[in-house]
Amino acid sequence: EGLDALVARRVAGEPLAWVTGRVLFCGLELQVDPGVFVPRWQSEALAREAASVVPAHGLAVDLCTGAGSVAAVLAAADSGGVVLATELDPVAAACARRNGVRVLEGDLFDPLPADMCGLVDVLTAVAPYVPRRAMGTLPRDVVDFEPRIALDGGEDGLDVVRRIVAESVEWVRPGGIALLELGGDQCDVVGVLLDHAGYVASKVIVDADGDVRGIRARRAR
């Protein structure tokens, strides 16, 4: 009966990670509660890239953390520093805490302590970036079940990303690194945004299939 119930949930379209309650991400087994955006393997490239640039005893911040997948990978890098995450959705924040992530609830940078301004070494974000017109093209289980707030990025998909880039200059130190997940056709636009915000040395992040998944840049000023 228990197995039949699980199969019925999956047949109805419920994400597999909600049915099993877990997902594997960068070798870490993470809990995923119903109602929480499911971490994608395609985000592993960004997480590994971020973990590779966290300095010893540095400060890393993960925005829009969801289940806490990227923050958990940063913490597992064991740099001896501090990893903080922020999340607007209290259900997702509670899930991330069960995955061992230190989460502050609130919108983007708002819940961060003021004394961290200008001190962040590594900033990561898997923010919503799907253009609103493309929402209907997503897989059925995503559209019908996963939280829209984690997917819908506005008209061109970059509403939240623009805010992150603009607001990050108050938090990321000169020389600090920002890594943002994006759609494959958004890197040029976001690269310009980063340039105007004082970031340099932009690098495109690709996943294991060679598809563009994000951008990395260093703050110069």
Image: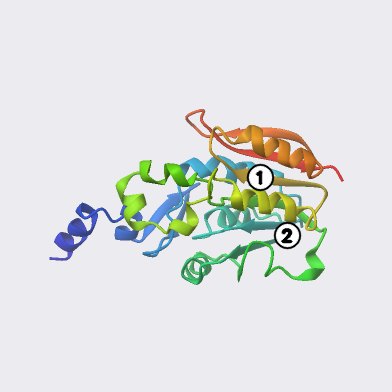
- Work out how far the residue at label 2 is from the one at label 1, CA to CA, in angstroms: 18 Å
Q: At x 26% / y 53%, what residue is drawn?
A: 13
The amino acid at mark 2 is Gly
Write down the residue under mark 1.
179
> Is 206 or 132 nearer to us in this picture?
132
Q: At x 14% / y 60%, what residue is drawn?
A: 4
Which residue in the rendered view is the most extreme toward the top? Answer: 210
Q: Position of residue 169 (x, y in %)?
A: 79, 53
Instruction: Say the numbered circle drawn on residue 133.
Output: none
The amino acid at mark 1 is Leu
When asked about the image quadrant of residue 214, the answer is top right
Vertical comparison of 90 with 15: above or below: below
Does dot 2 land on a helix, a strand or a loop?
A: loop
When asked about the image quadrant of residue 30, the answer is bottom left
Q: At x 48% / y 51%, what residue is drawn?
A: 152
Vertical comparison of 10 with 98: above or below: above
Instruction: Say the numbered circle drawn on residue 81.
Output: 2
